[in-house]
Image (spheres, helix red, strand yellow):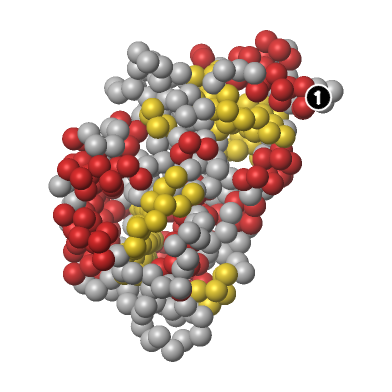
Amino acid sequence: MSTKRAPLTVNGRRYAWPQQPLVVVCIDGSEPAYITEAVKSGAMPYTAAMLKRGTERTAHCVVPSFTNPNNLSIVTGVPPAVHGICGNYFFDRDSGAEVMMNDPKYLRCGTILAEFARAGAKLAAVTAKDKLRRLLGHGMTGICFSAEKAEGTTMAEHGIDDALGFVGRPLPSVYSADLSEFVFAAGVKLMETRRPDIMYLSTTDYVQHKHAPGTSGANSFYAMMDGYWAKLEAMGCTIALTADHGMNAKTDDAGKPRVVYLQDLYDEWLGQGKARVILPITDPYVLHHGALGSFATAYIPDGTDPAWLARRTQLLPDVEVVLTRAEACQRFGLPEDRMGDLVIVTKTNAAVGTSAAKHDLSGLDAPLRSHGGLSEQRVPLIVNRPVHDLAADAPLRNFDIFHVALNHVH
């Protein structure tokens, strides 16, 4: 890749061309302590050495601290107020329906990936779940597929035929650590054979939903990633790591789920079905979290004073903050037309649900761990090389990762 090409401007931000292949990794659900504890245990020898000669910072993710809004912020370099993806799931006012926000029609700006591809760079993106694939690959020429659906890829749609055969691993279960390992195996194979100029790899947080930092299950998972990162470095790649959100236990002292069932409360306070509570964590893969996170938005009936309802909701012991739509969008950088009248965020060890009868927690085989709130904002931002001309105390967001890796690594 020539270093003489003019920088690109994407969504108002300037990006230099990579001087060597750049691999940006979004480690789904990676609270910073996961890497700290795994390194301390000796499970990540490559990472331990890399942190001494590279760059390790802490950044903040987008709130709601969920997968889709943060992955899209990372690949666009801007908050949801600009790119429009403010949850995994939302209430579409135009259609009057609750829908998954995984269709590119909801995306309001281009991506860094698409713009570099348009300018002539070789691009590749591999994600664990297919829910992200169409959004990440929107407008991008190159290779883009998911581990979940690797058996059905075509050159026309994904830029590669038979990704499953190409990677040479069995198709993984969507509820497994193998799904993420497939992503890294694919990334290494792509770098060996296609050598993309920029590659984006995004994992699943299945392991983090079940295992706390420092546990054997977590350390084993991070040891696996460590091995693949070492292979990418050996091929001369710049590796930039961040996360879409952190993760916390959402339980009481006995390990039982600690949940504010907000729809039930609003039905009691306002009348059955008068308010509509939306949980943006909702997606097709709820077995490991029961669609429970720490962020909700509520649509309230005409004639109800939002300030009154906000004050009453704020008095609930497990609620951290309640904001009006305007307040929440200003504070968190969210699109006003895609949020309800109120935004409700629960405390570190509590989750928010709709109605108790609508959440099936029978699939939980470990104490509930989830995300979505302010307490899951802290994420790692790590580069395997030193960065230059970046103040040590400069506040960083996870969506600064391309800016740091392209503009400050020399």
Tag 1: amino acid: Asp
Residue shown at 71%/12% (left/top)? Answer: 269
Q: Name which quarter of the figure residue 362 lies in.
A: top left
Say whether residue 375 is left or right of residue 28.
Answer: right
Q: Residue at x 54, y 40 (%)?
A: 64
Q: Is residue 226 above or below residue 219?
A: below
| Residue 133, position as x, y percentages in the image | 43, 53
Q: Locate the N terminus by quadrant.
A: bottom left
Residue 93 visible in rendering:
no
Q: Residue at x 29, y 53 (%)?
A: 183
Residue ID at (69%, 46%): 330
Q: Nearer the viewer, residue 337 or 144?
A: 337
Q: Is residue 250 above or below residue 178?
A: above
Q: Is residue 84 left or right of residue 357?
A: right
Q: Please identify the residue farthest to the top as the structure is shown.
A: 268
Are there few (<14), some (14-19), or many (20+) residues within 10 Å of tag 1?
few
Does residue 388 appear left or right of residue 69 in this picture?
left
* Residue at the outermost right position: 303
Q: Please state the horizontal and vertical placement of residue 331, each as a whole percent of the image.
A: 65, 45
Closest to the observer, 262 or 129: 262
In the rendered image, which quarter is residue 89 located in?
top right
* Residue 45, x across and y down, in percent: 16, 54
x, y percentage for residue 327?
Answer: 71, 40
The quadrant of the image that shows the C terminus is bottom left
Tag 1, which secondary structure? loop
Q: Report which residue position mark 1 lands on.
A: 305
